[in-house]
Image (cartoon, rainbow, N blue to C red):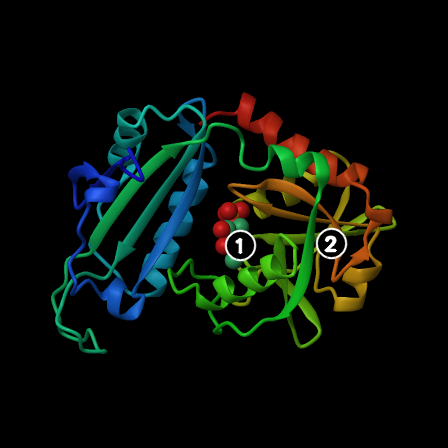
Amino acid sequence: MAAFTTFASFNKEIILLDELKVPINDRAFFFGDGVYEVLRVYQGQPFLFDEHMERLKRSLSAVNIHGVPDLTKDILANIALNDVGEGMVYMQISRGSAPRVHSFHNASLTPNILIYSKPFHEHPSDHEAKTGITAITHDDIRWGRCDIKSINLLPNCLAQSLAHEKGAHEAIFIRNDKVTEGSSCNVFLVKNNVIKTPPLSPQILPGTRRQFLTHSLRADGFHVLEETATKSELYDADEVFITSSIKEALAVIAIDQKPINGGQIGDISKRARELILDAAKSRLN
Ligand SMILES: Cc1ncc(COP(=O)(O)O)c(C=O)c1O
């Protein structure tokens, strides 16, 4: 049986994802030379679509990949083709195919564009929303442009795998004693009802949920600071929660086996998740 019954679009050709053959000379294969986006779909509609597409443009321009057309129609067509009600879209754009040479100077390359979507049978974080998640801390060994959503995710994969090996869900990166972000998420801390998340910088991805929540928590009356936090502030926080398009917002109830909020999900973490899910229901755009 096919591993995926999902239809993908690769350079506009529609093909079953598990039957798709990508060119060996794709620079994504040799160099990880590409960028990507992941969108959450609610009721057949991508959520925070404009924000994701803006970030995609920003990533493309930061790595000098040009000539990518507007993908809106192809994304919506793929969601419809795969009959995705609740689910996700993955899109990846590489610089293009060429014999393996590091430099792309003077090479006239056409980007390779992959899009696929797939339905979720249940929200992937429903269970974790009830139990909370656990995390480890991990040295942030990544490059200096983590604000670009590059497909180079080896340090993230290593860190998250180590978290899983240790029985935790996520790895929270620490650089020079400061919290940056998770291996696949942004991080928020709460202390004395003040919410803190690391400021935008080349060291973190400007998360769509991070942006959404800094605004909507403020609108909800919370004091939200975009400030650095140390590792000991992380351990001492009253609450910690992580955010991403797939997980939305989830409470972290222990870090490096030290309980946060007595190992319980806190009210502000719950509220953060509720704000996103309410918006997803009411503000489908
Ligand atoms: C490293 C990293 N930081 C942050 C995020 C959160 O971004 P978003 O909220 O847009 O999903 C992700 C999402 O995949 C990520 O991989």
Which of marks 2 and 1 precedes in the sequence?
A: 1
From the top left corner, tell me how far across and down residue 27 is, in percent. 23, 66
Residue 16 appears left or right of 213? left
State whether label 1 is within 8 Å of ligand 1: yes
Of 81 and 279, nearer the camera is 81
Quadrant assignment, res 127: top right
Mark yes or no: residue 207 visible. Answer: no
Q: Amino acid at mark 2?
A: Lys
For the view shown, which residue lies furthest in the front direction? 1
Identity, as a three-letter code, of the amino acid under mark 1:
Ser
Percent x, y of residue 265: 78, 40
Residue 35 drawn above or below residue 41? below
Q: Would you identify the image quadrant in which residue 23 lies?
A: bottom left
Residue 181 vertical position relative to residue 243 in the rendered view, above or below = below
Looking at the figure, which quarter contains the C terminus? top left
In 3D space, how far apart are the residues under numbered discs 1 and 2 (Cα atoms)?
18 Å
Residue 72 vs residue 170: left or right? left
- Name the residue carrying label 1: 184
Q: Secondary structure at mark 1?
A: loop
Q: Which residue is painted at 31% across and 40% down in the image?
A: 3
Give me the disc on residue 196.
Answer: 2
Residue 152 sits in quarter: bottom left
Along the viewing direction, whichever of 58 and 159 lies nearer the viewer: 159
Residue at image x 61%, y 60%?
163
Q: Residue 252 or 179: which is nearer the viewer?
A: 252
